[in-house]
Image (cartoon, helix red, strand yellow):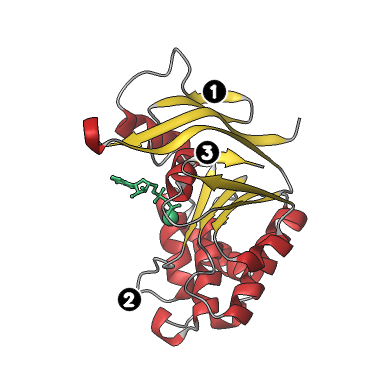
Amino acid sequence: MNTVLEVKDVNMFYGSGDNKIVAVDSASLAVKRHELLLIMGPSGSGKTTLLSIMGCILYPNSGQVIIKGQVVIGSNQATGNPDRILPHIRKGNFGFVFQSFNLFPFLNAAENVEFVLRIKGHNRGKIRQEALGLLKKVGLENRAGAYPSDLSGGQKQRVAFARALAGDPPIILADEPTASLDSKTGLEVLGLLKLLAEEYGKAIVIVSHDPKAKAFAHRVVYIEDGRIRS
Ligand SMILES: Nc1ncnc2c1ncn2[C@@H]1O[C@H](COP(=O)(O)OP(=O)(O)O)[C@@H](O)[C@H]1O
Ligand SMILES: [Mg+2]
């Protein structure tokens, strides 16, 4: 059983009454170690909402989220304040990558990675070494001292990947990771994500409406109006 992350019958709506929007409608999905799963769909189809539920950023209205066989959201026991529960579940399980890189402009590449290692409670004496090791994994060891303003889009996204790998989480979730990149750089970044799945055994979920991403995915699912079809 190599399934790392699973959602079952997840529903999410925003607003109420006449303004109610069903963002995710009875979605079920699973992703395994070594697998790059691509979720495609038009703008507004529920991709970001679904990914946020999978990553325990958003608490669904109903349904289950299961990590390594354990129901972390949606079990009868799992009650309490979601704002308290969700960070606890995220810790150690997920690395996140966003379209906009989200790097700190006043920290260099290595420091951006170190910042996350520090938050994750890693030994202060070792974080510089660890950060350099992570930058090496994404092919950026020679740009460790560069600030985001001096990095290309692809390099910035690589720093974001290095950061997502901090703490060695089994699952990486990426929302439109190529949307801010030119097409050649987008291909490089997709190649790197595939490598992280295949070589490092990560379970990776990418959300994208970039057709180039298809060639890198082990599996593609489509979402439309919040509903998944394979
Ligand atoms: N915080 C929010 N409040 C209200 N509606 C939202 C919110 N986030 C998303 N939506 C709506 O939910 C639907 C799905 O959005 P989203 O998950 O962002 O889709 P996608 O990522 O595929 O573009 C859209 O109709 C969007 O307008
Ligand atoms: Mg989105």
Q: Which mark is residue 227?
A: 3
Q: Which mark is residue 106?
A: 2
- The front one of 161 and 32 is 32
Which of the two discs, 3 and 2, labels the residue nearer the N terminus?
2
Pinpoint residue 67: horizontal percent, then vertical percent.
58, 31
Q: Is residue 45 above or below residue 210?
A: above
Pinpoint residue 178: horizontal percent, then vertical percent.
54, 69
Q: Give the residue type that dot 1 points to.
A: Val
Can residue 49 be seen here?
yes
- Of badges 3 and 2, nearer the viewer stands 3
Which of the two discs, 1 and 2, labels the residue nearer the N terminus?
1
Secondary structure beneath label 2 = loop
- Of badges 1 and 2, nearer the viewer stands 1
What residue lies at 52% left-to-right and 71% top-to-bottom?
157
What residue lies at 69% left-to-right and 58% top-to-bottom?
196
Mark 1 surroundings: few (<14), some (14-19) or many (≥20) residues within 10 A: some
- The front one of 79 and 42 is 42
Q: Is residue 13 above or below residue 46?
A: above
- The front one of 21 and 143 is 21
Disc 1: which residue:
71
Q: Give the residue type that dot 3 points to.
A: Arg
Secondary structure beneath label 1 = strand
